[in-house]
Image: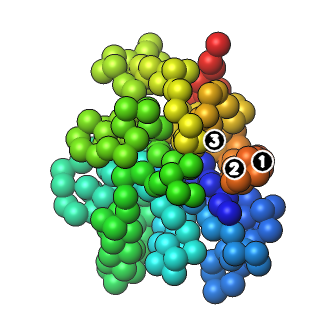
Amino acid sequence: MFDIIGDIHGCYDEFVSLTHQLGYEWNNETPIHPENRKLVFLGDLTDRGPQSLNVIEVVTKLVENQNAYYCPGNHCNKLYRYMIGRNVQQKHGLETTVEELSQLSSARREDIIDKFTTLYEESPLYLTLDNGSLIVAHAGLPEKYIGQSGKKVKTFVLYGDVTGETHANGMPVRRDWAATYKASPLIVYGHTPVEEPRWINRTVNIDTGCVFGGKLTALQYPELTTFSVPSSLPLVKEKFRAFP
Ligand SMILES: [Mn+2]
């Protein structure tokens, strides 16, 4: 039994509230469920929000202790590349995580970098759970990529079905892959903020834009019940995508 958490983006307080709502008890700075449910993180733990490093600390500890599963998002990929010394642009939210890191002593900074790079390097590109009945992938997974890996799959999982074009507001144009999904595994994903969890075919987008003033959502599996905590941040309405 899993509780899958949408894109946190440094919204640590909302994450803590959500775990309480889901019945988790905090012991030794990690949320543990009395009935052994496991948390599942679908990526984009950090950037833009106020407490990215606290989120990294909790998630790395949970995964290390085998109390949670994690797969990366595009922001995780970029933060990882920053941490291993690649020349990445500090924008689109990465600058907030870099700023948090700069406030630390070098020993604490090295510790966080070690934890996050280990988490990232050991994570699968997407999670296949419940004997293949449940797939968790940051920006989703079309039927043709189920069980597949490689460069194309990685780009899709991290960035979605992008066309390479951008909208007038600067957001990348993304095709609606979920609308034509026909396979039976349930695909749980995030990446594109929506006002309410969006169910279509056997897919659900649970990125309800917490960092843009929406809410942080969890999906319980196999119950398929969603729980949400409202964001403490101001609403940035143009960041949410409406589907017909
Ligand atoms: Mn994302």
In the depicted view, which residue is nearer to us: 69 or 208?
69
- Residue at image location 32% in from the left, 50% down from the top: 78
Q: Residue under circle 3?
A: 206
Closer to the chain start, of discs 2 and 1, is: 2
Q: CA distance from mark 2 to mark 3?
A: 7 Å
Give the image location of residue 203, x and y in percent: 59, 35
Closer to the chain start, of discs 1 and 3, is: 3
- Residue at image location 77% in from the left, 78% down from the top: 34
Contact between marks 1 and 3 (CB within 8 A): the answer is no
Label 3 element class: loop
Label 1 element class: strand
Q: CA distance from mark 1 to mark 3?
A: 11 Å
Ligand 1 within 8 Å of the CB at mark 1:
no
Give the image location of residue 73, x and y in percent: 42, 48
Q: Amino acid at mark 2?
A: Leu
Mark 1 or mark 3, whichever is nearer to me: 1
Quadrant assignment, res 103: bottom left
Contact between marks 2 and 3 (CB within 8 A): the answer is yes
Give the image location of residue 115, x and y in percent: 38, 74
Quadrant assignment, res 39: bottom right
* Quadrant where the C terminus is found in the figure: top right
Q: Residue under circle 2?
A: 219
Seen in the picture, residue 117 relative to 202 is either above or below; the reply is: below
- Residue 53 vs residue 199: left or right? left
Q: Residue under circle 1?
A: 225
* Quadrant where the N terminus is found in the figure: bottom right
Q: Amino acid at mark 3?
A: Ile
Is residue 213 visible to the viewer in this orientation of the structure? no
Tell me the crowding category of disc 3: few under 14, some 14 to 19, or many 20 or more residues within 10 angstroms, Cα based. many
- Residue 156 vs residue 230: left or right? left
Question: Exactly how many numbered labels are in the figure?
Answer: 3
